[in-house]
Image (cartoon, rainbow, N blue to C red):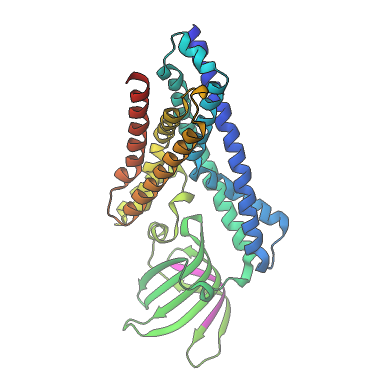
């Protein structure tokens, strides 16, 4: 009974520390993102302080998802350092409780926290991120021009009976079905350039793109303005998703169907597979972060070296973050499978923390 009560106590202290760290990270991310939006929104015709704040609030949940493992690491370190400073760990050890017994509740709590973040928080953040992109596109209005950023954005090439076309879009919503800041370069069947089309937005319909506020430029003629312009296409929604949709905007529960549809269309869908595996690995990654934090923060305060322990924990988390980015880039370049890219940081982080704890506690 004493062990159960103590385990619940350590788990609650860990959850409190992580929630406190998460609130601080959310506030910092919101402030930085809002300042950046204020800078970018200076040239947007419909931008107001409230709308920019609303966009920032919609974007923050997804930003928080990216730094969630580091937040758990900092929260776990703060929890154990506080327990050590108050000599609660000393009392627990004197009562015969091993380090594994007061680390296990935090590991279980982190796993549950990661499961909730994957199954509930991720769909919520994906939905809000989609809304933020819609609001941002509405505020930018007609000022979007693909010529201003011709080297960025989303690109796709399509073929039809009339020839070929290259489409560039600055923004993508609804997994590629709605585009903003569109430029289209059309070619005939012989590969000769025909015309350039700039449009405020484009919506994928059955068999064509519906361009709004289109300007059609043909060599030797004045630009032709059309409120609605239909561009024939043979692209399906699955093919468009692969080119324009970002995996981060697809909720966790919809990723398997996206992967299946992409496979049926003969597409690789590597980004979707990587995102799906990373979300599956998230509970285990958070548990690994707890082991890393425990390996550098269970030392008694009276032994000194607290600053060194904190620096070691932050360095370990940073190195693990760098490793995850490297494996992610290798997976996107098709040099590493999505499964390996998602699970290698989990295995390395978990084994590092486990071996360090094993050496410290059991020799």
Q: Is residue 105 left or right of residue 143?
A: left
Residue 251 drawn above or below residue 102:
below
Give the main secondary structure, helix, strand or loop, of the magenta stretch. strand
Q: Residue at x 32, y 47 (%)?
A: 338
Q: Is residue 158 visible?
A: yes
Q: Residue at x 55, y 90 (%)?
A: 222
Residue 209 covered by magenta stretch: yes
15 above or below 206?
Answer: above
Measuring from the top left, give residue 196's x and y in whole percent. 47, 81
Q: Residue furthest right?
A: 49
Which residues make up the magenta segment? 208-216
Residue in front for this viewpoint, 146 or 292:
292
Q: Residue at x 64, y 50 (%)?
A: 31
Taking depth in this image into account, of 118 and 258 the one nearest to the observer is: 118
Asked if residue 70 is among those painted magenta in the image, a careful observer would answer no
Q: Position of residue 120 (x, y in %)?
A: 51, 36
């Amino acid at each position: 009974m004493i062990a159960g009560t103590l385990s619940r106590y350590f788990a609650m202290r860990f959850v409190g520390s992580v929630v406190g760290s998460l609130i601080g990270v959310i506030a910092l991310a919101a402030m930085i993102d809002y300042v950046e939006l204020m800078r970018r929104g200076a040239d947007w015709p419909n931008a107001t302080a409230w709308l920019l704040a609303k966009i920032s609030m919609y974007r923050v949940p997804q930003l928080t998802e990216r730094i969630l493992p580091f937040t758990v690491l900092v929260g776990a370190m703060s929890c154990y350092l506080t327990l050590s400073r108050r000599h609660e760990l000393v009392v627990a050890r004197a009562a015969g409780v091993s380090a594994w017994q007061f680390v296990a509740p935090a590991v279980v709590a982190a796993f549950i926290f990661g499961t909730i973040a994957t199954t509930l928080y991720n769909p919520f953040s994906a939905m809000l991120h989609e809304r933020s992109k819609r609001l941002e596109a509405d505020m930018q209005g007609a000022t979007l021009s693909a010529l201003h950023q011709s080297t960025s954005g989303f690109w796709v090439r399509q073929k039809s009976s009339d020839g070929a076309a290259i489409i560039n879009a600055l923004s993508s919503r609804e997994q590629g079905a709605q585009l903003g800041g569109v430029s289209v370069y059309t070619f005939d069947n012989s590969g000769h350039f025909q015309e350039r089309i700039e449009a405020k937005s484009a919506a994928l319909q059955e068999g064509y793109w519906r361009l709004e506020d289109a300007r059609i430029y043909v060599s030797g003629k004045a630009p032709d303005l059309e409120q609605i312009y239909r561009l024939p296409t043979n692209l399906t929604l699955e093919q468009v998703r692969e080119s324009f949709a970002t995996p981060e905007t697809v909720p966790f529960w919809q990723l398997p169907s996206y992967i299946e549809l992409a496979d049926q269309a003969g597409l690789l869908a590597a980004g979707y597979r990587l995102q799906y595996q990373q979300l599956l690995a998230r509970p285990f990654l958070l548990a690994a972060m707890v082991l890393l934090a425990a390996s550098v923060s269970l030392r008694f305060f009276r032994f000194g070296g607290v600053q060194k322990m904190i620096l070691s924990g932050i360095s370990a988390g940073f190195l693990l973050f760098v490793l995850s980015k490297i494996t992610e880039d290798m997976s996107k370049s098709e040099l590493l499978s999505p499964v390996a890219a998602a699970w290698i940081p989990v295995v390395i982080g978990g084994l590092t923390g486990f071996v360090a704890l094993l050496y410290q506690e059991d020799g």
